[in-house]
Each structure stands twice: as structure tokens, then as C-alpha cells.
Amino acid sequence: MKAKFTNQEIVLRHIRDASYKPYERDLGNIDFDAPVFAIPDDNPLIVFAEELNKIGGKFIYCENQQDLALKLISLLDHHQWLNPVVQDTELKHFFKERNIVFQDGDTMPIDTKVGISYCESLVGRLGSVLVSSWSNPGRQMHVYPEIHIVLAHSSQVVMTLGEAFRKLRKKYAVDFPTELTLITGPSRTADIEKTLVMGAHGPKELFVFVEAE
């Protein structure tokens, strides 16, 4: 006469039997440098633009530096964003040469409306902007302004975060930045009662201008 088992006993017996059987796995040919996710076949710049738009950022393609300046002035005039804060020395020269009015942000006010900066890299697969503590203005620009405008070159676009890190290691071979920040779209949170709040710990809007090279 066969013994009768309850459903729970049957399940536990299967689990016990499975745990007694060692699983053979060949780990000798693992490529630890291979990407974890599949890499898109498209141009990294196209991928970045698509991913940035998906997460609420705004992508503006510029054919050259003059085109970038004209589109930037048009954006500022259209929204009447007066005296955007600029901290980067090179960017200040860019504004002065084109008579674009800006506020020198060596000491950035907490209530800054618009801030404009450069970046380290643009990560295509994530639609993210990588900034570091060594690039002016360091830690402030992606926290204080309500609107953050990033200016970049197409040569700064990479497909993966790993590529962005390799570029950083090459650029800062001697003195690596103490902090890296990945900006992925406008700041937001839904931690409080599951209500989406924009600008929770950074800009409500993110614009990325990319100049072709």
C-alpha cells in the first residue's frame, strides 16, 4: 500500500531532492568585459536623443557652434529666461564673444532659475548626462537651477557607461574626480504617496544641446 502525501509534502520532497543534486556549470569561458545588455546597432547620438526624450529631457541638435548659439539664444528669449547662471570659464568666454547676457555664478544662489554647463559625456543607451566634480561647476549646477541646459559635442556621445568611464580614466589619468553624477532626465520622485513630483532634488527641466563635429 502506497503512502499518501499531502501537496505540501510533495513540494518539499521535490525541493529536497533538487537540492541534493549538484549542478555542473562550466565557468571557464566567461567574458567579464562583455556588455551586460545588448548594444543597439544605431548611431549612439540617435540612441541618446531617443532615450533622453523618453525620460522627459529635450534634445537639440546643432550643425555647428554658430547654430548652437542661435538656438540657445532663441530658447532663452522664447521663455524669457534672463541672466542664466554660468560658472565654467570657457563657457563664459563663449557667451561674451556672442554678447549673450549671463550671470556669473562663482557663488551660485540656491534659487537659480536657469543654469548652463558643459559635461563629461553623454551616455546613449541611458539617455544620461555624466558630470564630474572636476568639471566646472562641479556639484552645484545639477542641483540648484530649476532648468539645467547642457552644451556638448557629438564626440562626447558614447553608447555605454563603461565607455564613459574609460574616457574619464584617460582624461584624468593622474587626478581622478572625487565625485561622478549621472543625470538621467529631469529630477523627479514618487516616494510620497506615489505622487510624481518634478524637481524634487534638482532641475525640473533638462535641455541638451549637441554640436556636430
Image (tube, rainbow, N blue to C red):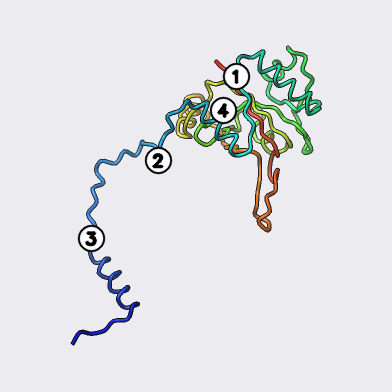
Q: Secondary structure at mark 3?
A: loop
Kindly identify which residue carries mark 1. Answer: 211
Q: Amino acid at mark 4?
A: Glu
The residue at the far left in this view is 1
* Mark sitting earlier along the chain (3/1): 3
Q: Residue at x 74, y 20 (%)?
A: 73
* Mark sitting earlier along the chain (2/3): 3
CA distance for labels 2 and 3: 27 Å
Q: Pointer 4: residues within 10 angstroms few (<14), some, or many (20+)?
A: many
Q: Where residue 36 is drawn, which disc sits there?
A: 2
Q: Amino acid at mark 2?
A: Val
Q: Secondary structure at mark 4?
A: loop
CA distance for labels 3 and 1: 56 Å
Q: Residue at x 23, y 60 (%)?
A: 22
Q: Where residue 120 is drawn, which disc sits there?
A: 4
Kindly identify which residue carries mark 3. Answer: 22
Q: Pointer 3: residues within 10 angstroms few (<14), some, or many (20+)?
A: few
Q: Secondary structure at mark 1?
A: strand
Q: Secondary structure at mark 2?
A: loop
Q: Residue at x 24, y 43 (%)?
A: 28
Which percent across, then down, holds residue 142?
66, 36
Q: Amino acid at mark 1?
A: Glu
Q: Residue at x 81, y 27 (%)?
A: 80
